[in-house]
Amino acid sequence: MNVAAHFSYWITIFVAIAGLYIVIARGNLLKKLVGLAIFQTSVYLLYIAPGKLIGGTAPIIADGFQVYSNPLPHVLILTAIVVGVATLALGLALVVRIREAYGSIEEDEILAQDATFTTDIRSDPS
Amino acid sequence: MIAQHLPALQVVLPLIAAPIIVLARRGTFAWLLAAIVSWAGLFVSAALLAQVADGAVISYAMGSWPPPWGIEYRIDRANAFLLVLVSLISAVMVVYSRLSVAAEVPRERHYLFYALYSLCLAGLLGITATGDGFNLFVFLEISSLASYVLIALGRDRRALMAAYQYLIMGTIGATFIVIGVGLLYLMTGTLNLADMAVRLRGVHEVRPVLAALAFLTVGICLKLALFPLHLWLPNAYAYAPSAVAAFLAATATKVSVYVLLRFYYSVFGESVVFSVLPMGQVLLALSLAAIFVASTVAIFQQDIKRMFAYSSVAQIGYITLGLSFDSATGLTAGIVHLFNHALTKGALFMLLGGIVLRLGGVRFEHIGGIARVMPLTSFGIVLGGLSLIGVPATVGFISKWNLILAALESGAWWIAFAIVLSSLLAVIYVWRFVEAAYFREPSAVVVKLNEAPLEMLIPSWLMIAACIYFGLDATLTVGSAAQAAVTLLQGVR
């Protein structure tokens, strides 16, 4: 197998696995989100890299240009980046709220706190 | 003129309502607008179902860009059926939610709640209506992001952790789906699902296509909470505000099941998924594991919402069990159960919301004797529980009957036996509620409670009544499901 010819795919897979590993292996809620963002970034590469032709230009018909890169993946990934930013922002906002409620952003400490915590019913029923 | 824009209208209405609600910042207005778009959505989807009832397919070119280049909305009998289900649940739920949300969400956040509710609804309807792979991903994320926030609005601080965990797992799932769609796009050069299906016809030994199938299967199964990818679900449903738990339990996982059906039957084709690959056996094993493991775990829960959440995981197992038979009967059984379970579980979570409103929680040690002060709510939960078990004259029986027919048709009598056996597990966890609610002495707190308000009881009981009605006369649901199954089995739509 020719590694150099599939260079972009190897990078994509490496980034995806690295991101997914961070999500699974880390207990810190912030680091998990960073891993998730890296994992999503690999998808951007997966879409964009095959759309690019070496020597290709934007698809505008003009004299002297025969090779065009596909613009559609770029547009799609623009949307995916927006989705990724929204997800990351929401995740970070949740982590802020979790820190306010628990005083920690370590998953094991939070789960330990919850293990001894049960909700009480309302003392004055309405 | 407006009739030809119906496929887009039902998605656009809640999508536009959300920013208007945020700008207006008024709780009552927000509820009213959310209610209007939900009910409008119900009428639109019912009109769509009527239009495609004869087997016609509506193709709507978004922005008049013709498919396969533009985004196409494609309505056939399969997704019209689901559109009606989602908008029906939403229309009932929005009436119910006003008092429930008033009690469980701080007043200054009410308008945000309804903005997110509208967004979530727009996302779910969009997923169902669209015929474009990437558009599907975007709507999936719209509905998912909205539902993470809705879950985080729960009063308990554990709602935050539940929302965070759902966000992590949901995003991994969505990313897997977009990787799968990306691989298919690389191989076919199109994002239009119908066009993709044409180009993939007969292709089944190309590795990127198989990799796409694998990524899509895992990603969608994360979203639909198929065992063992269900870990986000119990906490999310248990700690979310009651109206959110009821809405998501009845719609979100069902829409994901539809996405799985669409990719399996319409894009890859039944023969690739079930004949070339052993997906039928994989689904069968996971479904049976879901049914038995999740039902058993449900028995040992102390919180009734968590118990019914685990029961949801088990019920999703029945839906995928129907798919795994790879037959028209099995597919019909799966789709019927999808509808029936949405009704049953929606009703159960709505009724539990009534107890949360009065008592503040639904743990078994607190609800002792609650049937004496809240008889209608308790009896409704019992009827819903009977439907989960599959007692005749409830929708649960119709589902199990069709599932057993499909199992016998495929010659696997032991699966039919397993379905009956698994119902006994449901008997145990439903009995735990009956024992606590009817046979214990009410505590000093419980004695002072009142019945849930009518504004919540009526929508809940409408759902319970639907459970009984469609249990007695299943021609409409089974008929629609059978038609949807035929549409899906025709392959390319």
Image (cartoon, coloured by chain):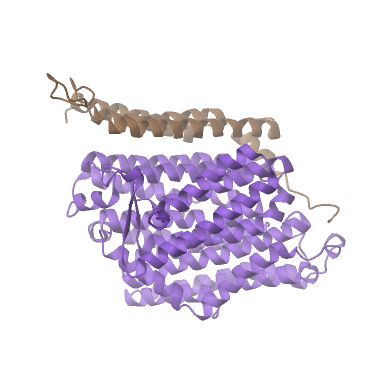
Chain colours: A brown, B purple
Camera-side residue: B408 or B398?
B398
Q: Residue at x 47, y 58 (%)?
A: B254
Camera-side residue: B27 or A43?
B27
In the visual, does B315 lie left or right of B379? left
- The image quadrant that residue B100 belongs to is bottom right
The image position of residue B220, as x and y in percent, is 40, 50
Camera-side residue: B417 or B398?
B398
The image position of residue B314, as x and y in percent, is 51, 62
Q: Is residue B30 visible?
A: yes
The image position of residue B403, as x and y in percent, is 42, 73
- The image quadrant that residue B446 belongs to is bottom right
The number of discs equals 0
The image position of residue B289, as x and y in percent, is 45, 60
Q: Residue at x 60, y 54 (%)?
A: B35
Q: Quadrant of the N terminus of chain B?
A: bottom left
Q: Is residue B229 visible?
A: no
- The image quadrant that residue B107 belongs to is top right
In the visual, does B445 lie left or right of B390? right
Q: Residue furthest front?
A: B1
Camera-side residue: A104 or B451?
B451
Q: Residue at x 73, y 48 (%)?
A: A118
Q: Quadrant of the C terminus of chain B?
A: bottom left
| Above-or-below relation of A43 to B489 | above
